[in-house]
Image (cartoon, rainbow, N blue to C red):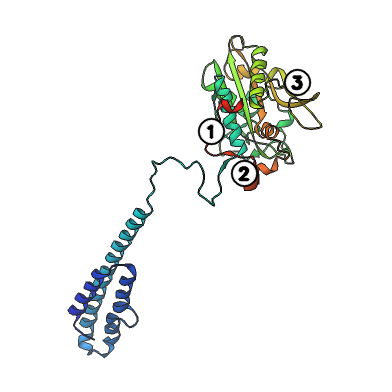
């Protein structure tokens, strides 16, 4: 083994530069710095050097070792970058190509979740009627969720067993809740802009309830129309047209039944005809409640800074899971959130087939 440090450094650096891949470079490293490497042997042999020469000899050997380590690190970086470039070139994907209409052989095709599909349908149908989509936060203040909508303090919806209350924010001065309906967005929309207004509000809502037909988190869609000279006739025509298009039943029976909601006056439940024995919609002599609606209460308009003597309108709301279950014959709410891909393949919509009004017949 040569003891000439200059020669060792030169030969090692030449071997480093000649290494064509990471495996070859590692072999050079082991040959110089491994347990039996050239420089390791020189460091181990310092004990046999005369005391007066040992310090200078050790410094010289360490300088060569550091130079070799720097050369190894630089070469490693260059080889890794070259390997990455080669891999990127080999695995390059042309993103300008159109999406495959079908998955490759052996792969499972994706699907749009039934809830997302229903939101697409709602947006398309109401969009054709001139509605736009409005959104709001899931965490709401007590005022937006209840007070602005004329919901009194003694209303059952304001009790802890029905509403998820959150710890008050530091210095906020008001209670916050997970919104129990999407109606707070109606108040936000009225406060943010002047009438006329025509919006739908699809989104998540939260209530302390859980069984085969209820979930602590579920989806609703609200609708709000404000203008001059809006009547119950406009409300009935809008909802009848929507229900018949959504369920694709041209003669679907629709019934409006007097009810009570704090934020509308008069208020109406909306029923559709169905057969209780078979579950078939549009047939039989039975009625099934489908949504709530009514004329916007004057107090709600006043709370949102709108003159009820000049403007009036209607509002409606329905559960997205509910109308999805009815349309597709889904008997239980819980599988919507269980992430069972078999269920999704059965009830899901094609991933590359956006909903259009043509699909509604």
Q: Real-space Cα distance between discs 3 and 1?
A: 36 Å
Expressed as whole percent of the image width and height from the top left, the position of residue 55 reads 23, 82
Disc 1, SS:
loop
Q: How many marks?
A: 3
Residue ID at (54%, 35%): 353
* Numbered disc in front, either 3 or 1: 1
Residue at the disc numbered 1: 354
Mark 3 neighbour density, 10 Å: few (under 14) some (14–19) many (20 or more): some
Q: For the C terminus, which image quadrant?
A: top right
- The answer to whether 230 is drawn above or below residue 3 in the figure is above
Query: Is tag 1's residue or tag 2's residue first in the polypeptide sequence?
Result: 2
Q: Is residue 129 left or right of residue 283?
A: left
- The answer to whether 153 is drawn above or below residue 178 in the figure is above
Res. 259 mark:
3
Expressed as whole percent of the image width and height from the top left, the position of residue 195 reads 54, 15
In this view of the protein, which residue sits in the foreground, 23 or 100? 100
Res. 345 mark:
2
Report whether residue 288 is seen: yes
Q: Are marks 2 and 3 in contact (CB under 8 Å)?
A: no
């Amino acid at each position: 083994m040569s003891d000439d440090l200059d020669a060792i450094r030169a030969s090692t650096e030449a071997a480093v530069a000649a290494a064509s891949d990471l495996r070859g470079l590692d072999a050079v490293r082991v040959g110089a710095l491994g347990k039996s490497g050239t420089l390791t042997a020189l460091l181990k042999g310092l004990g046999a050097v005369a005391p007066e020469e040992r310090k200078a000899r050790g410094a010289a050997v360490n300088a060569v070792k550091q130079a070799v380590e720097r050369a190894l690190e630089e070469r490693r970086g260059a080889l890794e970058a070259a390997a990455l470039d080669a891999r990127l070139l080999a695995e390059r994907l042309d993103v300008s190509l159109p999406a495959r209409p079908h998955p490759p052989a052996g792969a499972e095709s994706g699907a749009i979740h039934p809830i997302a599909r229903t939101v697409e349908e709602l947006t398309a149908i109401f969009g054709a009627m001139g509605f736009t989509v409005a959104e709001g936060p899931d965490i709401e203040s007590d005022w937006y969720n209840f007070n602005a909508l004329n919901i009194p303090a003694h209303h059952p919806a304001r009790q802890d067993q029905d509403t998820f209350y959150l710890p008050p924010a530091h210095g906020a001065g008001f209670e916050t809740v997970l919104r129990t309906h999407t109606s707070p967005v109606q108040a936000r929309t009225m406060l943010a802009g002047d009438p006329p207004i025509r919006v739908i509000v699809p989104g998540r809502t939260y209530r302390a309830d859980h069984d085969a037909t209820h979930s602590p988190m579920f989806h609703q869609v609200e609708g709000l129309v404000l203008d001059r000279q809006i009547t119950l006739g406009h409300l009935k025509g809008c909802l009848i047209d929507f229900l018949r298009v959504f369920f694709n039943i041209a003669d679907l029976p629709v019934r409006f039944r007097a009810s009570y909601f704090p934020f509308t006056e008069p208020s109406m439940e909306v029923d559709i005809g169905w057969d209780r024995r078979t579950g078939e919609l549009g047939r039989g002599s039975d009625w099934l409640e489908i949504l709530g609606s009514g004329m916007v209460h004057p107090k709600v308009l006043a709370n949102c800074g709108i003159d009820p003597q000049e403007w009036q309108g209607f509002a409606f709301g329905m559960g997205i899971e509910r109308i999805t279950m009815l349309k597709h014959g889904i008997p239980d709410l819980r599988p919507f959130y269980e992430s069972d891909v078999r269920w999704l393949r059965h009830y899901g919509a094609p991933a590359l087939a956006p909903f259009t009004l043509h699909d509604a017949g």
